[in-house]
Image: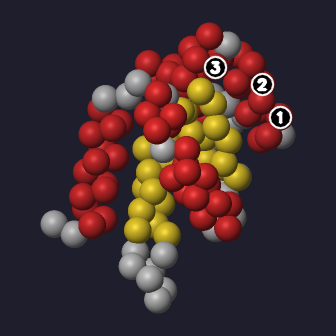
Amino acid sequence: MNKYQKIRNYAREMRKNPTDAEKLMWMNLRNRKLCGKKFNRQFVIQHGGFMTSVNYFIADFHCHEHQLIIEIDGGIHLNQIEYDKIREEILVKMGYTVIRFKNEEVLTDISKVLKKLRDILG
């Protein structure tokens, strides 16, 4: 099994076992519920590949039309601050806009989160 197949399978497993915050966010994004935009969840993004090895990121939510990535940060992100920073820098260089919300924000004030997203999506 190659690297892409492994990461794709991992993304599928993550879709089957979302956090409560991811479930709530997905309920509000799926089927073009937010501004009529199509979102994918646990979306695999390739980076590198020319003169470097190919690597992959998994975005919690992705809107291709706006090159927007939404990340929902749980407790694990407290232990990987530097990794998240580097990852975000790479994604921005690739043309993506990355917006992050903490689990608590999504779970306690989803309307504020959705308003912020509507403002970004226009």
Residue bearing the label numbered 1: 119
Q: Is residue 113 above or below residue 81?
A: above
- Disc 2 crowd rating (10 Å Cα; few below 14, some 14-19, many 20+) is few
Q: Is residue 115 above or below residue 15?
A: above
- In this rendered view, identify the residue nearer to me: 82 or 31: 82
Residue bearing the label numbered 3: 105
- Secondary structure found at label 2: helix
Number of residue marks: 3
Of the numbered discs 3 and 1, the one sitting upstream in the chain is 3
Residue bearing the label numbered 2: 115
In the rendered view of the protein, which quadrant contains the C terminus?
top right
* Picture quadrant where residue 5 is located: bottom left
| Relative image position of residue 30 (x, y in whole percent) | 53, 31
Amino acid on which disc 3 is placed: Glu
**Callout 2 touching callout 1 (CB < 8 Å):** yes
Q: Is residue 122 left or right of residue 80?
A: right
Q: Residue furthest top?
A: 108
Residue, x 30% and y 32% (percent of image)? 16
